[in-house]
Amino acid sequence: MPKFGIVSLVICLSTSFVAEVSAKELICEVPLTEWQSRDEVKAFFNEKGMQISRIKIDDGCYELKAIDDRGREVEMKINPKTLEILEIEAD
């Protein structure tokens, strides 16, 4: 394999690894006293056309499973204070 090919391969793999590590390190650092309640979370996302099926806590963030307004199953990690979507995965 030419040197250029090896260097390109190493750069691609390094970039993929860094992106994966960054995604796994997503942690919310919000004091519990500032968290919105689960009922407030459900109401907020229901107003946006989502049906919440599960809310759990992961790395200090809320993690939701829901059906979005297009009928897709989604998993979201949200900030418990602002309810900002930090990460979303759709099936």
Image (tube, helix red, strand yellow):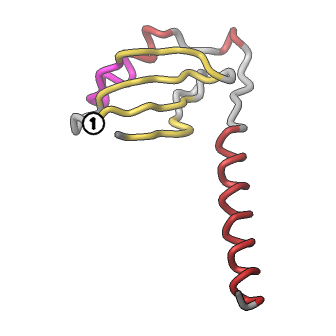
Q: Which residue is mark 1?
A: 72
The residue lying at 52 percent from left, 23 percent from top is 63
**Vertical placement of 63 versus 4: above or below?**
above
Closest to the observer, 84 or 15: 15
Quadrant in which residue 34 is drawn:
top right
**Vertical placement of 19 versus 5: above or below?**
above
Quadrant in which residue 24 is drawn:
top right
Closest to the observer, 37 or 63: 63
Q: Residues within 10 Å of mark 1 (few under 14, many from 20)?
A: few
**Vertical placement of 40 versus 18: above or below?**
above
Residue type at tag 1: Arg
- Locate residue 64 relative to residue 19 in the image: left or right: left
Closest to the observer, 62 or 48: 62
Return the x and y of residue 39 as percentages of the image width and height. 43, 8
Magenta segment range? 43-52
Quadrant of image for the N terminus: bottom right
Closest to the observer, 28 or 18: 18
Residue 79 in the magenta stretch? The answer is: no
The residue lying at 73 percent from left, 89 percent from top is 4
Quadrant of image for the C terminus: top left
Mark 1 residue element: loop
Residue ranking furthest to the front: 1
Return the x and y of residue 15 as percentages of the image width and height. 70, 63
Return the x and y of residue 58 as percentages of the image width and height. 62, 21
Residue 49 in the magenta stretch? The answer is: yes
Q: How many marks?
A: 1
Return the x and y of residue 62 as percentages of the image width and height. 56, 21
- Locate residue 67 relative to residue 2 in the image: left or right: left
- Locate residue 63 relative to residue 26 in the image: left or right: left
The residue lying at 74 percent from left, 25 percent from top is 29
Quadrant in which residue 59 is drawn:
top right
